[in-house]
Amino acid sequence: MNSIFELENRLDINKEFEKLVYVFHVDPNAAIFAEDSYHQRDYNTVMEAIDKRVFLKWKYRDTFLGVGEYLEHIGIDYEETCTYGGQYIDEKSFLYYLEFLSNMFLLVKEDKSIELLGNTLAAIENIPRILEKMNYKLKQIDDKIIITKRDSDVDSILKIVNKEIADILLEYSDFRIENDIEAKKSILKELDLYIEKNINIKSFDKELDNAIGVIVNKMGINHPIKEEPYKSFTDKELIKWYDNCFVMMIHAIRTVQVNKIKNERKQLLNN
C-alpha cells in the first residue's frame, strides 16, 4: 500500500480551472490583502480587486481597460466561465489564464503595501505546480512572466550565453509559437547569426555544421526555398525540421562549453 506521499494527483485542467475561478472570481470570503483590515475595501472578490487596483498599472495591457475585456481577448468567456464556472476550457486558453494570473500577482507582489493571505496565496502557489504537471514552467523576463515548455537542454545553456540569446532560447519554447512557422523562422535566424559570430562548429563537428547549414540555408530561414524536396514541404514538415535545427544549435552551443571544460581539465592534469 502506498503512503499518502506516493499517491498520484492526476491533473484535470478543468477541475483546476474551476478551483482557481472560485477563489479569484467568486468567493467573497477569500482572504485577499492584509491591508483590508485597515481600509474599507471597494471590491468583493480577488479579481475585482485586481481589476480596480492592479490591471491598469500593467504596461502590457495594450488598449484593454479591464480584466473582463482582457480575458475575453485570451479566449475566456468572462461572464459565463468566470462567474459561474463549470465550463470546458482548452489547454491553450488555460495556459493563457495562468500566465495572466502570474503577471497580475507579480504586480501585486511589487506593491509593498499589499500582502496576500489565505486561499489566495495557496491558489497562487498552485500555479507552478499545475504547470509542472503539464510539463511547463514560469519564467520571469525583466518585468513580465511567460510560460515555456520545460526543456532541460535549453536550461543547460541559459547561463553560458548572453541575456539576449537566453531570452531568444526561451522564446522558442513559448507555448504560443508551437505551430507558428514565421516566429520560429525568425528566432532560428537570430540564433544562426549568433553561432556564425561566436562558434566555429566545423572545427569540432563538420556533420553537425552541414546539417544546420542545410536547414537554415535551404529551408526558408536565411533564404527563400528554391529547390526540391524542400519546396514541397508542408508547414508542418518545415516546423519539424526547424525544431530539429533548434536542438542541434543547442547541442553546438553546449559542446563549446563541454570542450572548454575538457581543456581546463587537461591543463589541470598537466600542471
Image: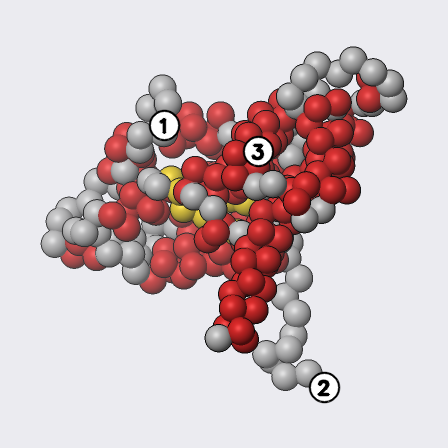
> Which residue is tagged 1?
61
Vertical order, 154 against 182 (above or below): below
Work out whether mark 1 precedes mark 3 in sequence or the reverse, and give the earlier one: 1
Tell which tag, 1 or 2, sits nearer the viewer.
1
- Mark on residue 196? 3
Asked if residue 213 shows in the view, the reply is: yes
- Label 2: how many Cα within 10 Å (few below 14, some 14–19, many 20+): few
- Label 1: how many Cα within 10 Å (few below 14, some 14–19, many 20+): few
User: Considering the numbered disc 2 on the image, is that residue within a helix, a strand or a loop?
Assistant: loop
Under mark 2, the amino acid is Met
Question: In terms of depth relative to the viewer, which is nearer, 91 or 190?
Answer: 190
> Which residue is tagged 2?
1
Under mark 3, the amino acid is Glu
Tell which tag, 3 or 2, sits nearer the viewer.
3
Marks 1 and 2 in Cβ contact (< 8 Å):
no
User: Considering the numbered disc 1 on the image, is that residue within a helix, a strand or a loop?
Assistant: loop
